[in-house]
Amino acid sequence: GQNIDQPTEMTATEGAIVQINCTYQTSGFNGLFWYQQHAGEAPTFLSYNVLDGLEEKGRFSSFLSRSKGYSYLLLKELQMKDSASYLCAVEGNTPLVFGKGTRLSVIA
Amino acid sequence: EAQVTQNPRYLITVTGKKLTVTCSQNMNHEYMSWYRQDPGLGLRQIYYSMNVEVTDKGDVPEGYKVSRKEKRNFPLILESPSPNQTSLYFCASSQDLGSYEQYFGPGTRLTVT
């Protein structure tokens, strides 16, 4: 079966750093995606990890440990516009499976 | 501009009245899929298509049909909509499975009364 777990909600302060965790149990593993989704809008691609380690892209970084079935998304220098849902998605033996998403609220 | 378009964006209909939601992409992508998104349940895949005339069921296919007669189009058909199909629907496409990001359409908010 496929199971992807993320915290439901998180709150962080503008300018701070926040880490959003994702654990997964899937049939096979081909890669892990992170998407950002603002309320009422379509998801947009943030990052992709297939090998263990950290991938950095500006203020956003994503980490993967395949042996632990674990990933996190790190957002630095938080801005108000980062308030959104963050979706972890895994591609295994079946096409992409999404977690339920983490709603991040950035407060002043 | 590379994009995925969906129509209609909003639809209110009644139980049993057949409807089609269109999806079109202009990126020559092989892979297309349909998702529904419901509060507390996240994005769930309805159907996907690896190429023309190749479709397969996702996690929640009951009550839906799809077709892929042309590479660019992937319509979602609800033959007899029911209130439990009230949801936000997204079409997505990508170059292929694997490491390719998915591009999502703007979404269709469907209400079935």
Image (cartoon, rainbow, N blue to C red):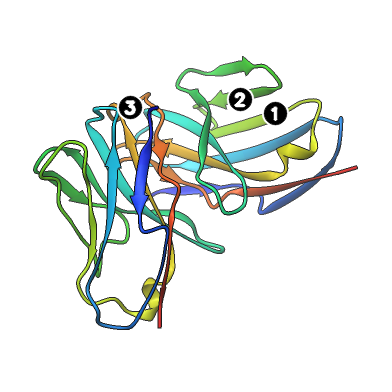
Identified at 72% across, 29% down, the residue is: A75
Amino acid type of the residue tagged 2 in the rendering: Ser
Which of pointers 1 and 2 lies earlier in the amino acid sequence? 2
Task: Name the residue type under label 3.
Answer: Gly
Amino acid at pointer 1: Leu
Label 3: few (<14), some or many (≥20) within 10 Å? some
Residue visible at 64% across and 31% down?
A73
Left or right of A49 on screen, residue A55 = right
**Mark 2: few/some/many CA within 10 Å (<14, 14-19, 20+):** many
Residue pictured at 57% horizontal, 54% vertical? A40
Disc 2 is attached to a residue of which chain? Answer: A
In this view, B88 is above or below A5:
below
Circle on res. B98: 3
- Residue assigned mark 2: A62
Please tell me if label 3 and label 2 are on a single chain. no
Q: Residues within 10 Å of mark 1 (few under 14, many from 20)?
A: some
Chain bearing mark 1: A
Which residue in the protein does label 1 denote?
Answer: A74
The percent coordinates of residue B24 (x first, y second) are: 28, 42
SS at circle 3: loop
- The answer to which image quadrant residue B65 occupies is bottom left
Judging depth in this view, the residue of B94 and A73 nearest the camera is B94
Nearest the viewer among A62 and B74 is B74
In this view, A94 is above or below B46: above
